[in-house]
Every structure is written in structure tokens, then in C-alpha cells.
Image (cartoon, rainbow, N blue to C red):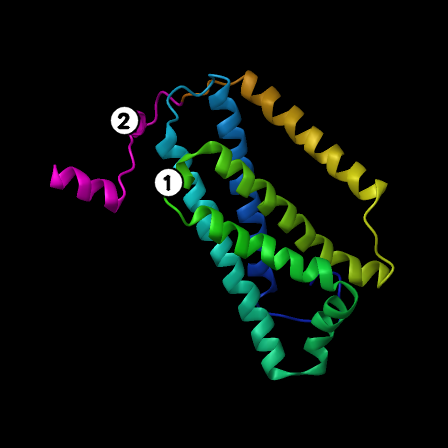
Amino acid sequence: MGLDPHWFSTLFGWYVLATLLVSALTVIAFVTIYLRSKGHLPFVNDSHIHDLAKYMFGFSVFWTYLWFAQFMLIWYADMSEETVYFIARFNEYKLPFLGMVVMNFVFPILLLINSDFKSRPWFVVIGGLVILAGHYIDVFVMIMPATVGDQWFFGIPEISALAFFIGLFIFVTFRAFANAAPLAKGNPFLQESEHYHYYNIEHEGEENHH
């Protein structure tokens, strides 16, 4: 329970799951956009990127729903054994605590709610960077109050750990990709995927009009 042994929430497991799902989908989108830009994924088109961005948007909303449900129920019940979790974070981590809510909800909503923006890789990358930073702060706020209290900082240990795991991920992932076929030729949906195209309501309306 976020290293707080005396605190309990039935939503905490789902909340952490949502954080990890959004982060994983964002990294998948990053890797896909990068490999396509280098010509290693010729069958991936803008419609595939659009769908990845839709998942990022959808799970950002899901994360916000769980965050609000957990926060609202604990605030409304006002039970001291439950509120202690948020009191520590609101009093001693107010800037990162409130900042990560904006980064994980408000920014993705404003950027990715537009259907056309989801098909533009550079928009997806900008939104994804903010989402990843926001969820890093989310995990930071989960762990630090229970370990160092109000004596928190962001310095060389945090930056080094982040750089180490990013480097490890890049090394392992792209080394494995270099030794594997990028196209699953036996997949029964391969033909459909090659010609996949996303039509939104506006485009359908324009085509019907013409």
C-alpha cells in the first residue's frame, strides 16, 4: 500500500495498475513511432498511431477516474486511518501531488481529445513525455512520504536511477528487436492490419456528402 503499513484502500491496486498501463502504452507508442521513422515498421500507418494515442487517452481518463474515486471516498468518509495518507502528501508534497494530477489528466485531455492530433506523431510524443513525467511523479509521491517524510528532494540518485533503467530498456528492447522479425507473418489479421485505416465521423460525413 505505497509503503504505508497502517493505511488501506481497496482501490490502490487498480490505481497502480492504471498508472502502469498508461506508462506502458506510452512507451509502446514511442517505440513504434521511432521504429517507423527509421523504416523498420513499413506497415504501420497513421491510423495505427491514432489507435495507440486513443489508448493513451482512454487509460489517462481511467487513471483519473480511479484517482478521484479513491480521493473523494476517503475525503468524504473522513476517517483518520484513511485520511492520513493524503494529509501527508497534501501538506508536504503539495506541488508534486497537485502537479501530477494536472500532468496526468488535464494535459492529455486537452492534447489528445482532438481526433486529428492523435494521428500526428510529434503531438503524441509531446503528450507522452508529459504523461510519463507525470506518472513518474505519481510513483515518487507514493513512495517518498513513507520513506523520508518531508525531507524529500530530486537529485542525482533519482536522475541516475531513471537514466539507468531507460538505458537498460533501450538496450534490451532494441537488441531483441534486431534479432526478431518485425512482422508476424503467420498472424491471421496481418492482411487486415496492412490496409487498416481509421475513419472518423467527420471524414465519413464528407465522403457521404461527395
- Which disc, if any, is residue 91? none
For mark 2, give the secondary structure: loop
Residue 12, visible in the rendered structure: yes
**Which residue type does callout 2 highlight?**
His
| As drawn, 167 above or below 83 | above
Q: Residue furthest right?
A: 151
Q: Residues within 10 Å of mark 1 (few under 14, many from 20)?
A: few
Q: Position of residue 3 (x, y in %)?
A: 75, 61
Q: Nearer the viewer, residue 111 or 27?
A: 111
| As drawn, 201 above or below 14 | above
The question of residue 209 being in magenta is answered with yes
Q: Is residue 84 left or right of residue 112?
A: right
**Which residue type does callout 1 highlight?**
Asp
- Which residue has dot 1 on it? 116
Residue 142, visible in the rendered structure: no
Give the magenta part as a residue range.
184-210
- Which residue has dot 2 on it? 195
Q: Quadrant of residue 190?
A: top left
Q: Position of residue 54 (x, y in %)?
A: 41, 45
Mark closer to the observer (2, 1): 1
Q: Residues within 10 Å of mark 2 (few under 14, many from 20)?
A: few
Residue lying at 48% horizontally and 52% vertically, measured from the top left: 110
Quadrant for the N terminus in the image: bottom right
The question of residue 123 being in magenta is answered with no
Q: Quadrant of residue 44?
A: top left
